[in-house]
Image (cartoon, helix red, strand yellow):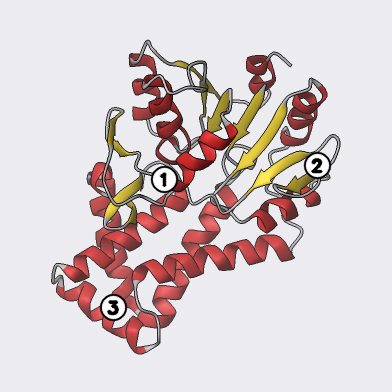
Amino acid sequence: MKILTDFDGVLTDPLHEMGRMREVFEEYLNARAGMASLALLAEADAFAAAHPERVGWENGGRISGYADEDGFVAVNGVAALMDRMAREGHLAALEVLDRLRAGGTPSFERVANDAFDRMAHETATTTHRPADPATGPVLGALLDAGHDVLIVSNSSTGRILGILEKSGISAYSHGETPKPGAVRVRGDARKFELGTDPSVFLAGRPVDIARPKFEALLREERPDIAVGDVFSFDLALPCALRLRGEPGFEGLHAVLRRRPYTPAWPTAYLASEPRLAWSVIDHLDDLVRIAGA
């Protein structure tokens, strides 16, 4: 059986890193554009809290993942919102953006990307080990049972391998010679990247599944189980492929890794769709049971 799993939020405890990304985002805004930027951020936060279905990580001007799906997407979402506010002529957003550009930063999105990179660098260069304590035993049990375990993530392959190595978990990069007893890693998956033509999948909210790079990867791998914590990025497209009856996806089992930040709408959708095989797990150990390891 082939098990395709996301990394951040599924195999890691991401709350520290999510909080740190937000802290750095605020620090960068304040350092580059002053207190006015934090007032603007508070306004954007309030809008995102009131209208989570209208804020998210944007790609090509379309929402790729919603801001209420996890803390990383939340930062990218409010950054995209502030860029949109500036485009629409919001005076405070324009003022702050002018200050950013005067210092060489072209957009709020760039500030969010810089904040993630800073957080990732800190993780790589300190003793912090974000891997979930259950990750090593669970991956070991799945591999020992003969399953093909593949990590597919927006995070870079190097970041994933570094975190796993810190936690004593054997892994290797996709394309390298397989290592016995090790998990395969395909980072930089760009699951957030949307194609030119929108394709809407109704899952309690409209989720854009025009993700050509991720779809090509899924069609190459044809997993039996897909695991993720962010429905829009990790599970919407695999579920859509099963519902379409695409060859190789008829038996796909979707597993949502529920976290404290997980919104209610993905679970409600899964429960409403009888044509899907799905599970919601609160503990990573449950994946061993689902896979029959």
Mark 1 or mark 2, earlier in chain = 2
Mark 3 or mark 1, earlier in chain = 3
Tell me which amino acid carries mark 1: Pro
> Looking at this rendering, what residue extends furthest in the top direction?
274
The residue sitting at 47% across, 60% down in the picture is 22
- Quarter placement of the C terminus: top right
Quadrant assignment, res 43: bottom left
Q: Position of residue 58 (x, y in %)?
A: 33, 55
The residue sitting at 20% across, 74% down in the picture is 92
In this rendering, the answer to whether 290 lies above or below 183 is: above
- C-alpha distance separating marks 2 and 3: 47 Å
Instruction: Examine the rendering and report whether any part of residue 127 can be seen.
Output: yes
Tell me which amino acid carries mark 3: Leu
How many numbered circles are shown?
Answer: 3
**Tag 1 residue:** 212
The residue sitting at 36% across, 50% down in the picture is 194
> Looking at this rendering, what residue extends furthest in the right direction?
180
- C-alpha distance separating marks 3 and 1: 32 Å
